[in-house]
Image (cartoon, rainbow, N blue to C red):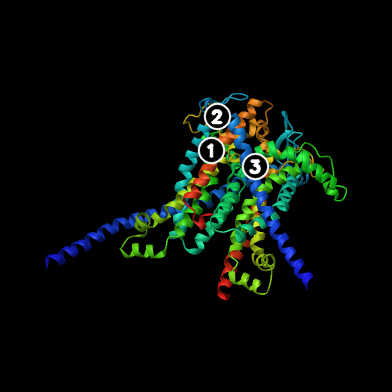
Amino acid sequence: MALRRKRRKFGSTVGWTLGWLATALVLFSLVDMIGTVVVKGIQSFHWNMLWTVTSGKAGGLENAILGTLELVVISTVFAAPLGVLGGVFTAEFAHARVSRTIRFLTEVLSGVPSIVIGYFGYLLMVLKWGWGFSPIAGGIALTIIMLPYILRNTEASLMQVPLSLREAAWGLGMTRFQAIYKVIWRPAAGGMATGILMAIAIGMGETAPLLYTAGWSSLNPTWQLTHHELGYLTYIVWTYIDMPYDESHALAYSAAFVLLVIVLLINIGVRLLVTRPSLRR
Amino acid sequence: MHPDKCHCMWELIHLRKVSSASKTADKVFRLATGVAASSPVVFLVVIAIIVVDQSIPSMKYNGWHFVTGIQWNIGDTYGSLVHKNGVMAASGASFGAFPFIVGTIASSLIALMIAIPVSLLTAVILAYKVNGVFQWILSILVELLAGIPSVVIGLWGIVTLAPWVKTNLAVWLAHLGVVIPYLAGPIGTGMGLLTSGLVLAIMVVPIITATTRDLLMQVPILYREGGTGLGMTSWEVVRYVCFPFIKDGFVGAVALGWGRAMGETMAVLMVSGSALNMLPQNLYSPISTMAAFIADQLDSALTDASHMAVHALSELALILMVLTLLTNFLARWLVSRTSGAKRLRAEVRA
C-alpha cells in the first residue's frame, strides 16, 4: 500500500515537472527569439537608415517603412469599416442562424493560408484586372487577412454589452440605429479599437500575401495606386538575410528589429490597456 | 385646450416627424452593415472561384500526374509551345507536386508531434498552477509568441535554430539512429525537414495552448473537487478528469494548429532548404512545402509565356486551400461541440 502511494505521488511530481519544463521551453523560445533579434538589431541599426532608401546590397529602410505604412493605411481603410459594420450586423441585427453562418465563414476565411490569398490577388488583380504589382492590390490582399480579426473582435465586444442597456435605449423611443450609435457602441469601443490595432499588427508582419501583389521597389512610394511596385519591411528581412554580405545581414536585422518593436508595442499596449478575457483567444 | 397639453401634443407630432426620418437612416444603416457582413463570404467565394478557374488548364495538361509526379519543370520558355489536351505549354514542361505535398504533410506532422505535448502541458500549468497577475502575464507572453511576424521567426530559424540543429540536436538524434532507423542519416546543412518542423511547432504552440487553456478552465470545479475527494493526486485529477473532459475540443485545437502549420509560408521558406524535384530522404534532408514553393516560384511564374506555370501554381494553391479548409472544418466542429454542449450539460448536472 505504501509503495503504491509512493508511486502515485512520484507520478504526480513527474507530471507537474514536465508541465513546468514545457512552459519553460515555450518561454525560453520566446525570450531567445526576441533577444536575438533585439541584440542583433541594436548592433546593426543606425538612425540614418530611417532616411536612406534601400540599395543593391544594403542602404536604409526609408522606402520599406513608408511602403509598409502605405499598405497598412490602404488595408485599414478597407478592412476597418467592413469589419466594424459587419460585426455590428452579426451582433445586433442578424438572426442567430445567419450570424452563426457568417461567423463560421469568417473563421474559414481566416484559415485560408496567406500565400493562397496573395496568389489569388496575383491571379485576379495583378493579371486579370491588369493593375500590375501595386499598392492597391497589396492593400486589398492585406484587407482579406485583417477583416476576420476586426469583425470577430467587434462582434465579441458588442455581445458583452448588457441587454438592459439596449432595452433602455429602445424604451426611450430610439431606433436600432440610434441606439447603436448613441449608446451601445460606447462600452464596446475599447474592444473594437483592440481588434483594429491587432489587425494592423498582423498586417504589418505579413509577407506572403504581398509577394505576388505588391512586388518590390527600392524607391520611395508615391501615392500612385496601380502599376507601381513598392517595398515593405518584411521583404527586406526575407531577401537580405540570404545575401552573402555582412551589410545586407545588418539591414535584414534592422528591418526585423523595427518590425518587431512596432508589432510588440501594439500587442503589449493593447493587452495592458484592454484586457477583457473574451478578447483574449 | 390647456396650453400644456397642446405643447405636449406638439411634441408628440414633432417626435413622430423625426422618427420617420430616422427610420430611413435605420434602414440605410442596416443595409450597410448587412453588405459589410457579407463581405467575408464574398471574398471566400471569389477566392475559391478564381483559384479553381485558373487551375483548370493545369488540370487538363497534367491530369493526375500533378499529385504523383516528382519533376517540376516549367519547360523551355524560349522554345515553341506544345499543345496537349487542348491547352498550350512550353515544350518539356512537367508539373509534379508530389514532393511539396509530402513536404507539407511531413513538416506539419513533425510540428504537431512536438507541439501537442508541449502545448497541452503548458496549458495545464497556465490553467491550474498559476493565477492572478502571474497567470495574466504568462498568458500574454504565450500569446505574444503568436503575434511575432513569421519572417522574424524565420530569421531566428536561420540565425539560431538551424546552426543549433546542425551542431547539436541532429548529431544527438542521429546517434539514436542505431535504435530508431528514422532518425539516422547524413545530417546536412541544418536547413531541412527537422528545422522546418521545429519552426512550425513554435508557431503552432501558442494557438493550441490558448485554446486548450480556455477549455481546461471550462472544466467544472465540482468535477475536479470530486476527483480530489476520491483521493486522487492533483496530477491524477488533471489526467483522469480534465483530459477526458476536453478531449474533443483538444483534438479540434490540434486540427486548427495543423491547418496553420500547413499554410505557413515565410518561416518554412527560410529554413526548409528549398528542395526541388526530390523527395526527402531522411529527417534532415532539404524539403519544400506547397506554400513555400508558391512563394519561391515568383520569378519563374513571370517568365512563362504560355502561363502554364501560373496555372500549375494555382492548382497547387487549390490543393493547399482544400487541405487547410478540411482541417479547419474539422477543428471548428470539434471545438464548438465541446464548448457548447458540454458546458450546458455540466451546468445542468452541477
**Chain designation of label 2:** A
Q: Which disc is residue A137 wearing?
A: 1
* Residue type at tag 2: Leu
Tag 2: Cα neighbours inside 10 Å, few (<14), some, or many (≥20)? many
In this image, A91 relative to A22: left or right?
A: left
Q: Element under label 2?
A: loop
The answer to whether residue B288 is seen in the rendering is yes
- Reading the image, the residue beneath label 2 is A61
Asked if the residue at tag 3 contacts the one at tag 2, i.e. Cβ–Cβ closer than 8 Å, the answer is no
Percent position (x, y) of residue B315?
67, 44
Find out whether the residues at labels 1 and 3 contact each other: C-beta distance under 8 Å.
no
Three-letter code for the amino acid on which mark 1 is drawn: Ala
Secondary element type, mark 1:
helix
* Badge nearest the viewer, 2 or 3: 3
Q: Is residue A236 visible?
A: no
Q: Nearer the viewer, residue B133 or B9?
A: B133
Identify the mark at residue A32; answer none if there is no mark. Answer: 3
Image point 67% across, 51% down: which residue?
B323
Q: Chain of mark 3?
A: A
Instruction: Give the Cα distance between marks 2 and 3.
Output: 25 Å
A25 shown above or below A158: above
The image quarter in which residue B210 lies: bottom right
Q: Residue furthest front?
A: A2
